[in-house]
Amino acid sequence: MRTHRQLAVYQSILQVLHEPGCPLCKFLKEYQAARLQKRSESETHRLCNFHAWGLAAVQDAPAAAQVFIRILSEPELNANGNQACDVCNEVTAEKDLRIRELATCLHRPAVADWLRKEAVLCIPHATKLRRHVPLGLVSRIDTIVQNCREQLKEELDQLRHEPGTDRSGWGALGRVAEFLVSQRGLRV
């Protein structure tokens, strides 16, 4: 996350279907970054470790200072470790919305074509999506995950047997991590 990074503003999960990787990860990563960059003091009461550091990294210093002053001024809001982070709550709500959106659009020809030809889903998002689709599509999601798994295993096998340290396939390690647990910096 970088200060003043130009963010893609997505309105629908359908806008990211043809981009590399899991579309839910892509959408939510941009959503999370935008929420951190545009955070106001009035909407922020609790931040987890990750989002406190994220806010400090991406927001203008004066605006971030205002947010942190508010949080420091209300210690009772942060004293209870059981209270959820405001940003985590927003990302979770958006994730649920986008999973339902994708599930309801799977019958559209363009989305059905994406499912057959180029779909990529990380395991956490595929697992959540499975809960929202008709039984007939669950096996398609399982096939997508299995295809990703097999492709990544092949890439890892090639990497493992490639001599030397100047390996061209090191990106496979990041793709495997994303497949297993979602994109870096995104809590699913």
Image (cartoon, rainbow, N blue to C red):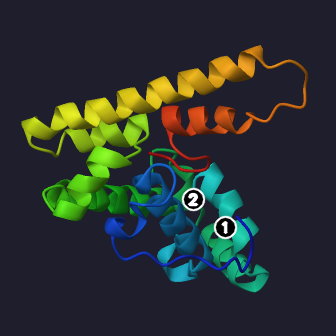
Q: Left or right: 139 with respect to 182?
A: left
How would you rate the neighbour count of disc 2 (Cα within 10 Å): few for under 14, some for 14-19, many for 20 or more? many
- Indicate whether 157 appears above or below 115: above
Looking at numbered disc 2 in the image, what kind of residue is underneath it? Leu
For the question of whether residue 102 can be seen, the reply is: no
For the question of whether residue 68 can be seen, the reply is: yes
Measuring 72% from the left and 80% from the top, which residue is drawn there?
A: 4
- Residue identifier under label 2: 47
Q: Residue furthest left?
A: 135
Q: Residue furthest bottom?
A: 62
- Residue identifier under label 1: 55
- Nearer to us: label 2 or label 1: 1
- Which is nearer the eye, 105 or 41? 105
Q: Left or right: 20 with respect to 58?
A: left
- Indicate whether 48 appears above or below 101: above
Residue 127, image x and y in percent?
31, 35
Measuring 15% from the left and 59% from the top, which residue is drawn there?
A: 104
Q: Are marks 2 and 1 in contact (CB under 8 Å)?
A: yes
Quarter occupied by residue 95: bottom left
- Which is nearer the eye, 47 or 119? 119
How would you rate the neighbour count of disc 1 (Cα within 10 Å): few for under 14, some for 14-19, many for 20 or more? many
Quadrant for the C terminus in the image: top left
Residue 3, image x and y in percent?
74, 75
Residue 178, image x and y in percent?
55, 40
